[in-house]
Amino acid sequence: MNILALIQKRYTAKKYNAHKVVPQEKIEELKEILRLTPSSINIQPWKFTFVQNPEIKAKLASVSMHNTEKINQAQLLVVFSVVDDLDAFEKVVDNEFPQFRKEMYHKIKSSQTEAELKNWMAKQVYIALGVGLTASMAMGLDSTAMEGIETDKYKTILNMTAYKPLFAMAVGYGADEDSNRLEITPKSRRLLEDVIETI
């Protein structure tokens, strides 16, 4: 199936089949796909937490607003986090990056406020979310992107210090009775000519 057909077929799952297990090899593949996500100057300011432990997933579900049921049903929850401790990340830059990328990062850092720098980093994490949603579909899995989470409580539950959760993605197999399936609720998008301009 080509990429257009995949995107045409993809939908946001609102209800999952809690009994259909996602093969571990697909989860491992998704980990590697997210690791390979592109980012500006290849800065990679992220952490992807794959939550399969039912107890921890249930704790996160309880602080996920209207997404509680979806998280409890889905086989996997991926938490997307961004650098929150810039001093700790500075060590990553200095120890892991080649010289030219260190220089690029420091140039960007010196020209922005801390808030602007963190905002730039957060934008990179959204690229990873798009990759994760598309990759899940390509692997025959359903997914749900969720900004509706209590990020500070996620941070506490996951014992994070240097990173801060931004959003999450539930992954699994959509339930047959999910009213958001395309055969029940067709995909709705604005017209191409309204959103695409060719010059």
Image (spheres, rainbow, N blue to C red):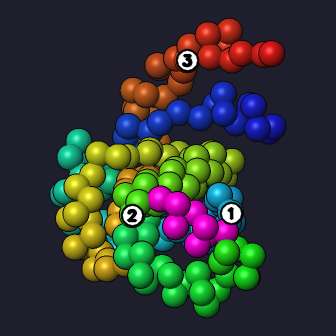
Describe residue 155's horizontal placement relative to residue 87 as left or right. left
Of mark 1 and mark 2, the one earlier in the sequence is: 1
The residue closer to the viewer here, 93 or 155, is 93
Q: Residues within 10 Å of mark 3 (few under 14, many from 20)?
A: few
On the image, numbered disc 1 is attached to which residue? 41
Residue beneath the point at 48% across and 28% down: 181
Gap in Å between the C-alphas at discs 3 and 1?
A: 32 Å
Q: Quadrant of the C terminus?
A: top right
SS assignment at label 1: helix
Asked if the residue at tag 2 contacts the one at tag 1, i.e. Cβ–Cβ closer than 8 Å, the answer is no
On the image, numbered disc 2 is attached to which residue? 114
Of mark 3 and mark 2, the one earlier in the sequence is: 2
Give the number of the mark in front: 3 or 1: 1
On the image, numbered disc 3 is attached to which residue? 189
In the image, the segment drawn in magenta is 104-112
Q: Quadrant of the N terminus?
A: top right
